[in-house]
């Protein structure tokens, strides 16, 4: 695990964008694993700008998102599918047909999870997986006590995660308590993993991930076993290292 500590969130986004620039130039048909949350937004903006400047294209790219809320259809404004369309996909030259987000409203969720795994395998596996981290050490929606070898499946969200994400929902709005998420085993198969964390609120999770024992209590600690992971953090998120 390589840990890169930079001054601030803007520098984290720029450093991350450089990794993608290089990857897309080297392999224009890359398979990208993508993430939601507020942390990757500035990286997405960097990538949109680079795409507009013609530095690289997403035309040959296939993407797979980490997770989705269970119970929200793809056209629900609060779904991660809509988040990705709004914040990233509609601003770049990617073919929408090549973007994948786990379905939150499948009639048979167990089969849908198997199909998602098969689609990743059929695409040749993920070249770069982008990750954020929850305050409790979750990656995707792999909450503490997740099996470190897990595959794409339905997961119950913890109270802490529900509370953390409540800021995105109006008080009178349905907030899902279940998710569909790639498993930790799925994530660990990515050839390169780029994890971004910024701000003081992530400092304890970053410390547990990087220096703590590998444990399902901190799902991100499994990344210590991954041979090619870059953790990019700002000074605040690195403050407990
Ligand atoms: C969400 C997402 C994660 C994300 C995390 C942190 O619950 N499922 O993929 O990394 O929470 O989000 P943020 O970047 O907004 O702090």
Image (cartoon, rainbow, N blue to C red):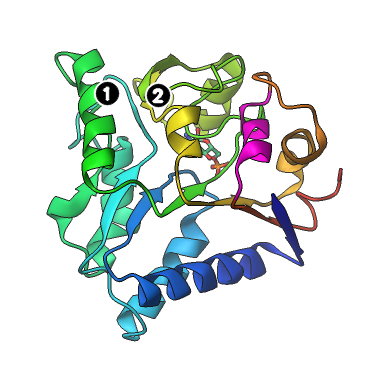
Q: Which mark is residue 151?
A: 2
Residue at image coords 22%, 64%: 94
Q: Residue 207 lies in magenta, yes or no?
A: no
Q: Residue 225 lies in magenta, yes or no?
A: yes
Write the start and end of the magenta stretch as one range.
218-227
Between 39 and 110, the one nearer to me in the picture: 110
Q: Is residue 3 left or right of residue 118?
A: right
Q: Badges 1 and 2: C-beta atoms under 8 Å apart?
A: yes
Q: Locate residue 32, reporting x and y percent.
A: 36, 54
Q: Locate residue 29, reporting x and y percent.
A: 26, 65
Mark 1–mark 2 Cα distance, whole angstroms, equals: 8 Å
Looking at the rendered structure, the secondary structure element under dot 1 is helix
Between 83 and 64, the one nearer to me in the picture: 64
Residue at image coords 45%, 40%: 189
Q: Which mark is residue 113?
A: 1
Residue at image coords 43%, 69%: 23
């Amino acid at each position: 695990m390589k840990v890169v500590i930079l001054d601030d969130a803007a520098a984290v986004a720029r450093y991350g964008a450089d990794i993608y620039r290089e990857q897309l130039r080297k392999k224009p048909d890359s398979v990208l694993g993508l993430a939601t949350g507020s942390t990757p937004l500035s990286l997405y903006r960097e990538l949109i700008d680079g795409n507009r400047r013609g530095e690289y294209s997403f035309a040959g790219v296939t993407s797979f998102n980490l997770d989705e809320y269970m119970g929200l259809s793809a056209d629900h404004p609060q779904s991660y599918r809509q988040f990705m369309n709004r914040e990233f996909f509609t601003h770049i030259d990617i073919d929408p047909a090549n973007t994948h987000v786990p379905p939150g409203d499948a009639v048979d969720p167990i089969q849908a999870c198997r199909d998602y795994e098969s689609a990743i395998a059929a695409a040749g596996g993920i070249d770069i997986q982008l990750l954020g981290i929850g305050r409790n050490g979750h990656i995707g929606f792999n909450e503490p006590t997740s099996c470190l070898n897990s595959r794409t499946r339905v997961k119950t969200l913890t109270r802490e995660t529900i509370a953390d994400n409540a800021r995105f929902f109006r008080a009178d709005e349905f907030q899902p308590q279940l998710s569909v998420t790639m498993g930790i085993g799925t994530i660990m198969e990515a050839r390169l993993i780029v994890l971004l964390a910024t701000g003081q609120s992530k400092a304890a999770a970053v410390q547990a991930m990087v220096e703590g024992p590998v444990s399902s209590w901190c799902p991100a600690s499994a990344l210590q076993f991954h041979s090619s992971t870059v953790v990019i953090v700002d000074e605040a998120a690195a403050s407990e290292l």
